[in-house]
Amino acid sequence: MMYDEKMLEAFYSTYKGKIEHVRAVLKRPLTLAEKILYAHLYDVSGLKNYKRGEDYVNFRPDRVAMQDATAQMALLQFMNAGQEQAAVPSTVHCDHLIQAYKGAQEDIATATRTNEEVYDFLRDVSSRYGIGFWKPGAGIIHQVVLENYAFPGGMMVGTDSHTPNAGGLGMVAIGVGGADAVDVMTGMEWELKMPKIIGVKLTGTLNGWASPKDVILKLAGILTVKGGTNAIIEYFGTGTSSLSATGKATICNMGAEVGATTSLFPYDERMAVYLQATGRKRIVELAESVVADLRADEAVISEPEKYYDRIIEINLTELEPYINGPFTPDAATLFPSLPKRCCGMVIRGRWKSD
């Protein structure tokens, strides 16, 4: 079993009580992002209504994930911390040092030879301190996390910019530096400026050529590459349930391109289907027991302008497919408006030039 069932049972058994306590202290409805953040406060004795974008707050994330390039220094620092094992479930993923060149089999073999000393170090240190180790070729870090470790209502940090991919399963997952990961692994408080919350209301359903990536490309055009800085993007509305869990993850993954701290979706049946398909039926059972608190409160959904710092509405039914190039995530072009001679036409999913 890839996930820690006992840890998850303990998490969900206390989650509802934590949210009720937060709601009682703050005396107001809560967004989903707030529920998860406040439920992971390092010290609840000083619980108060933290000012978004101003107050620095200490948190206690549930787990850590590290890619092989950044894990080297992180593990060296952890070794000097005097701990016998990581304080929270942690994993190392050997994916960033593999250069795509000739093909999977040959590229992995080349990377294994070239980085043999690094991989051996990461493997041995991981074994010594009870850290999960994913060898070269075992998968890309943020996808491995989504398929094995992400869970609704959880909070994690990862030394990879696409850590927010786990938001596709309703998790607050934040990309950090190696030193931040070490703090969490040693059981220390992890500091973060309380993020602002951008509410993105989705209505309708995707149709035609439009796909989940067009949702975030549309949003990036609105926010630009800096518009999400120091903010969590929280999706809500009837349109969220029309997107698959992997589609949600794609949207959250690319939220990093607008500078967002992270992005997340409310728990729904599509997430349950994905969790079951990836062998995590028990998580579905646990999540269903607190399902009301894996979404924003109804009062928030009814009057979102009162509880989000900014509201953006996207009608999925009207969304058209976008085309984008490298280095311009906020400058996508609507596909129908592109000159035919410039980029050709699509036939059964393949490009065909004029």
Image (cartoon, rainbow, N blue to C red):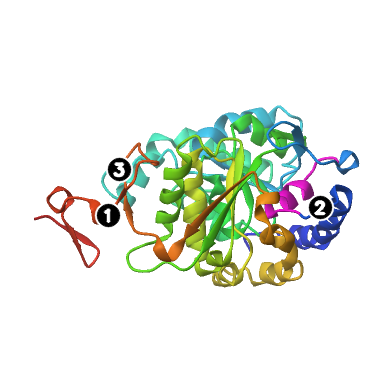
Q: What residue is shown at x 70% (from left), y 61% (from top)?
A: 294
Please state which amino acid type lies under the numbered disc 3.
Answer: Gly
Residue placed most toward the observer, 54 or 309 = 309
Q: How far is disc 1 from disc 2 in space, using C-alphas?
A: 44 Å
Q: How far is disc 3 from disc 2 in space, using C-alphas?
A: 43 Å
Q: What residue is shown at x 44% (from left), y 55% (from top)?
A: 215
List the residue tagged with mark 2: 28
Q: Residue 269 location in percent, x, y?
A: 60, 72
- Please provide the residue range marked out in magenta: 30-43
Q: Name the secondary structure under disc 2.
A: loop
Q: Name the secondary structure under disc 3.
A: loop
Establish if 56 lies above or below 27.
above
Residue placed most toward the observer, 47 or 221 = 221
Q: How crowded is mark 3: few (under 14 residues within 10 Å), some or many (20 or more)?
A: few
Q: In which quarter of the image is residue 331?
A: top left
Can residue 295 be seen here? no
Q: Residue 119 location in percent, x, y?
A: 50, 39
Q: In which quarter of the image is the C terminus?
A: bottom left
List the residue tagged with mark 1: 335
> Residue 46 in magenta?
no
Q: Residue 120 location in percent, x, y?
A: 52, 38
